[in-house]
Image: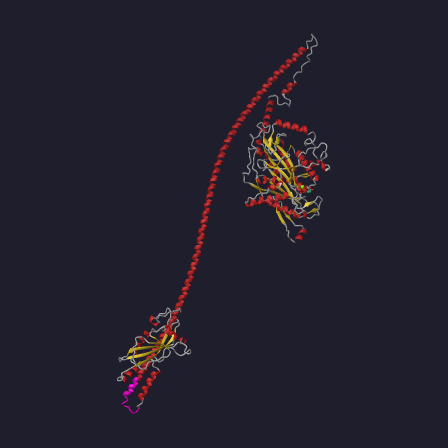
Amino acid sequence: MFRQAKGKTPRRPPPKKPSNNQKDPVGVYCRVRPLGAEDVECCIEVISNTTIQLHAPDGLKANRNGEFKETQYSFKKVFGIKTTQGELFEDVAKPLVEDIIHCKNGLLFTYGVTGSGKTYTMTGSPGQGGLLPRSLDMIFNSIGPYQAKRYVFKPDDKNGMEVQNQVDALLDRQKRDSQTTVPKTPTTRRIDPEFADMISPVEACKADGVDEDSSYSVFVSYIEIYNNYIYDLLEETPIDPIKPKWNGAGTPLRNNTEFIPPQSKILREDQNHNMYVAGCTEVEVKSTEEAFEVFWRGQKKRRIANTQLNRESSRSHSVFIIKLAQAPLDADGDNVLQDKNQVNVSQLCLVDLAGSERTSRTRAEGSRLREAGNINQSLMTLRTCIEVLRENQMCGTNKMVPYRDSKVTHLFKNYFDGEGKVRMVVCVNPKADDYEETLLVMRFAEMTQEVEVARPIDRPICGFAAGRRQRNQAFKEELTRRLEERGGPVDGESPTVLNQLLQSFPPLPPCEISGPNDDVTLPRLIEALEKRHKIRHMMIEEYNKTAKMLKSVLQEQDSNLLSKENFIQEQRGKLGEKEKMIQNQKNEIDRLEKKSRMLEYKIDILQKTTNIYEEDKRSLQQELESREHRLQREMSEKRRMETRMQGIVTDSKLKWEKECERRVNAKQLEMQNKLWVKDEKLKQLKAIVTEGKTENRQPQRPSREKDKVPAKRSASPSPVPTGPPVRPLHRRSHSAGGERWVDHKPTTNVDLDTVLQPNIPNAITVNAPNEKALSKCDKYVLTHQEVASDGEIQTKLIKGEVFKTRGGGQAVQFTDIETLKQENPVAASRKRRSSETGPDGEPMEGDWTDVETRCSVALEMRAGSNLGPGYQHHGYPKRRKP
Ligand code: ADP
Ligand code: MG
C-alpha cells in the first residue's frame, strides 16, 4: 500500500504484510458503451446487471465454421449503454473516495481496447464528468471546511510528508504570491469553459465520518507512461522568455525545435517498500476547480508531447494520483499538530490504461493496420502478473510475480503485495469489429476477478480528545454570550460596550488660548479631561470586571476539563481491564486451539492404525478363503478317490468271485472225473468178479477196457482233464518259433539211474525258477520227486504255460502232470495199477499244494492286491502301478 508518510510516522507503522487476513477480490466492473452508428453490427448483449453475452459476428462464424459460440461473462456489475457517469461513480469510485478519506489507499483503472470508452469513463466529456472529476469533487466536498492552509503540509522528496510551522507556511505563501504574478493560481484564473462543465456535477457527494479534528490537504500528480518511460506531466519546464514553447492559448507552436521533450523519471522505493516516482511534481490543490485545472494542464502537455513526438496516444498509460494528507489539530484546535509522525497520507490512483488491442490502430479512422507482435508490453506484463498472482493464491504456490518487468506493474506492486482496494472498469465497445479483441479483454477481466487483495485495515486518527475544533468554537461562543449578558465587550467587530464607550469619548476642545483673558478654553479643556478621566475609570472597572468574569469562566472550564480528564482516566482503566480480559480469552482460545490440534493429531494416528488393522483383517480373510478353497478341493479329491477305490474293490471282488467259481467248477469236474474213473474201476472189478460166470462170453473185454482206460489216461493224463482256463490275451505267441521250455530241476532231486530220461530240446535248465528264464520261455516244467505210498520214489513232470502278467511279471499256469515211476517186478502189476488208477485225491491235493509252494508260482500279480507272498516271484524287480 501507499502510505508515503508512514516512513515518517512511526506512531502507526503499518506492517509490511497486513496483519488482517481479510482479502477482497479485485472488483471488476464492465461498462458497455453505445454503438457509434446504428447500422453497425453488435456483438454484445447485456443479459443481467452482472452478466453479458458475446455473440460471434456473422462473418467470423461463417469463416471459422462454428468455432465461436456464444459466451457469457460475469462481473461484479455490468453497466449498460444507458448508465450515466453519476451512476457509475456511485458504484465504482465513491467507495474508493470514502476509503482515501479514512486513510486507505485505492487503485482504479480502466481497461479495454481503444475507443471502448476508457477515457470517457475516467475523464468524461463536457457536461458528463467522469470518475476523476467526480472523485475530486467528492473529496473537496467532504474535507472542504477542514483543509489546512497552503504549505502547512509539505511533501519531502522521499515520498513522505512534513508539517511546516505557521510562519514558514506563511513565508512560502507570500513567496508564491509574489512569483505568480498572473497565471498558476487557478483560484485567480478564470476556469477554462472546456472543462467547467465537467467539474460541476449536480449530484454533489460527500463522505461521512470526516475527522473534524484533523486538518487535510490534497496533492495531485499526473504522470504518463509511454514505451515504459515515465513522464511527469506537471513538471514546470524552464521557460525561455524569448522563445515561448506554446502560445497563450495552450496551442503548441508548429516548430519542433522549440519543443523541449520531457525527461523521463525513475521509480524508487521508499523505506516502507512503497513505489513512487522520484522527483515527481506534487501540486497542492485547494478546490475541485484548481485540481481539475492542474489535471487539464497535464492533459494539454500530454497532447502536445504526443503531437510533437508523433506518438500514438492510445499506447500510453496516464496515472492521476490524488494524495490526501491529514494530521490532527493541536490541543487548541487551531493549527495542525507540529509533529510529522502524526501525518497520515493516503492516495487514490486513477489510471487510464493504454488500448489493450494487439493490433495498432492508425490515426486514420477505420483503417486498421495489423502489426503482429506490436503488443503493449506493459499490458502483457500486467496480464502475466495477474496470472501469476492468481496461480499463487489459488494453488498456494510462491512464484515470483514479475512486477518489475514494466513500470505500470512496478508502480502498483504494493497494491497487490500489500493492501488496498483495487477496482477495474472493463470498457467494451459492442461493435462486431472489436469482437476478437473484446474476447481477450473479457478473459483477462475474468481472470483478474479471481485475484484477491488484502483489505486495508481501519486506522482511525487518534490525536487528542476528540472534538477540539468544535470545543474551541463552543468556548468562543459561550464567552461572547456571557460578555453580552454582562454588557461587556464581546469581540472587536460587533458594536460592544467598549466601542460605545470609545465612541462616546469626548473629543478634546481646541487648546489654543486666544489671550490672557481667555477663560473659556482652559475650563473647557479641564472639563473634557475630567470627563475622559471618568471614562477611563469606568473602562478600568469594566476591564477588571471582564477579567474577573473570564477568570471564573476559565476556572469553570478548568474544573470541567478536570472532571472530563477524570472521566477519561476512569474509562482508560476500564479499557485496560477489558483488554486484560480479551488477552485472557485469547490465551484460552490459544490453549483450546492447541488442544484441538493435539486431538486432531491423535485422531490422525488412530485413523492410520485402524487402516493398518483393516488391511491386516482383509489379508487374513483372503488367506482364510483361499485355504477353505483348498480344503474343499482336497475333500472332493478324496471323495473321488474313495469312489474310485470302491470301484476297484468291487471290480477285484467280482473277479475273484469269478475265479473262485471257475476253480470250484474245475474241482467239481476233476472230482466227477475221479468219480467216473472209480466207477469205471468198479465196473471193471465187477466184470472181473463176474468173469467166472461169463468167462467165455466175453474174454477180450476186460483187456479192451484195460487198454481203453490207459489210452484214455494217456490222452488225458491230467487230473483236471478240462485244463485250467487260459487267457488267450496273455498267451505267448507260438508262431514266433518253436516252444522253449524252462526246465526246473531242484537240487534236492535224487539221480535214480533211470533209462528213460525226459529230453526237452531247446530248454533252459534252472534249479530255482527265475524271472529271466521265465521271460524267455513260454513253457515250464518242474521235475518233482516224492515217495509214493508203496515206498518207491515217484518222479512227476509238472508242466505249465508261462504267461505275462498284467503287472509286467511272469506267471505259470499248470496244465499237465506226467508221472514217471519205477517199480519192483514182483508187485509190479498190482502196484502199477494202483499207482496208475491213482490213489485217493487227498494226498494229491497235498502234493499240489507242496509243489505250488516250491515253484513259487506267481499266478497273478497286482500291486496293492491281497495275494499272499507265496504267489509272487521272489526277487521280482519291477513293480508297476496298475
Ligand atoms: P478510449 O479511451 O477507450 O480509447 P474513448 O473514451 O476515447 O475511448 O471513447 C471513444 C469515443 O466514444 C469518445 O468519443 C467517447 O465520447 C465515446 N464514448 C465512449 N463511451 C461512451 C459512453 N458510455 N457513452 C457515450 N459516449 C461514449
Ligand atoms: Mg483513451
Whether 473 is drawn above or below 604: the answer is above
Quarter of the picture holding the N terminus: top right
Residue 313 in the image, given as x and y percentages of width and height: 68, 41
In the current view of this chain or complex, which residue is farthest to the bottom?
A: 696
Residue 202 in view, yes or no = no
In the current view of this chain or complex, which residue is farthest to the right?
A: 254
| The image quarter in which residue 11 lies | top right
Residue 384 in view, yes or no = yes
Left or right, 794 with respect to 633, comes to left
Left or right, 430 with respect to 634, comes to right
- Magenta highlight range: 681-697
Q: Quadrant of ligand 2?
A: top right
Number of callouts: 0
Quarter of the picture holding the C terminus: bottom left
Residue 352 in the image, given as x and y percentages of width and height: 65, 40
Whether 83 is drawn above or below 611: the answer is above
Any magenta on residue 652?
A: no
Viewer-proximal residue among 533 and 799: 799
| The image quarter in which residue 165 lies | top right
Colour convention of the picture: secondary structure
Residue 187 in the image, given as x and y percentages of width and height: 68, 31
Left or right, 741 with respect to 577, comes to left
Residue 464 in the image, given as x and y percentages of width and height: 56, 30
Any magenta on residue 690?
A: yes
